[in-house]
Amino acid sequence: YCMLLPGPEAQQLAVYVGWLLHRTAGGLVAGILFVLPGALVMLGLSSFYMLYNDAPVIEALFFGVKAAVLAVVVEAVIRIGKRALKNRVMVAIALAAFLAIYVVKLPFPLIILLAGLAGWIGNRVAPALF
């Protein structure tokens, strides 16, 4: 029942425990109450930004937040890259996908399809590299 839900394990666990205790209604309430605080914080921050985005202090604050978010994303890319990109062929496919989306401006679904096709063909031709 719980494994059909997308998202992190904590969300799934909250819904599952709610479902165990009070069946479907408990799962729904637990899931909503798990997501609600984060949603309210995002709503509050976005409203605050819309009201005061011209203030220099707010601009500086969000500039700092952008830098922090960029650092988190770069760290995640490095971690995933170390695990997923095991050889130069995989690095080349990742680099080609990056160039295709940012330089050539190909649509993302097409890039996924082409990368999958490259992996499928590569697995047939040189399985040791894939």
Image: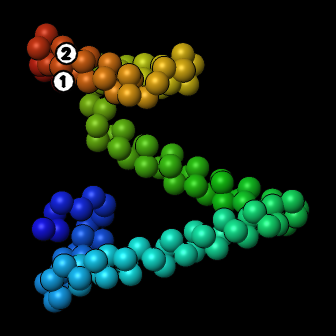
**Location of residue 117 (image quadrant):** top left
Residue 123's place in the image compared with 9, above or below, is above
Residue at position x 34%, y 27% in the image: 112
Between 62 and 50, the one nearer to me in the picture: 50
Residue 19's place in the image compared with 74, above or below, is below
Q: Position of residue 126 (x, y in %)?
A: 14, 13
Q: Residue tagged by mark 1?
A: 130
Residue 58 visible from this viewpoint: no
Residue 118's place in the image compared with 30, above or below, is above
Q: Position of residue 10 (x, y in %)?
A: 29, 72
Residue at position x 32%, y 76% in the image: 31
Instruction: Say if mark 2 contacts mark 1, CB within 8 Å.
Output: yes
Assess disc 2: are there few (<14), some (14-19) or many (≥20) residues with their C-alpha within 10 Å of its C-alpha.
some
Residue 16 is marked as: none
Between 2 and 91, the one nearer to me in the picture: 2
Question: Which amino acid type is marked by label 1?
Answer: Phe
Between 50 and 71, the one nearer to me in the picture: 50
Residue at position x 31%, y 82% in the image: 29
Residue 77 relative to residue 14: left or right = right
Residue 119 relative to residue 98: left or right = left
**Location of residue 33 (image quadrant):** bottom left
| Measured Cα–Cα span from mark 2 to mark 1 | 6 Å
Residue 122 is marked as: 2
Q: Earlier in the sequence, mark 2 or mark 1?
A: 2
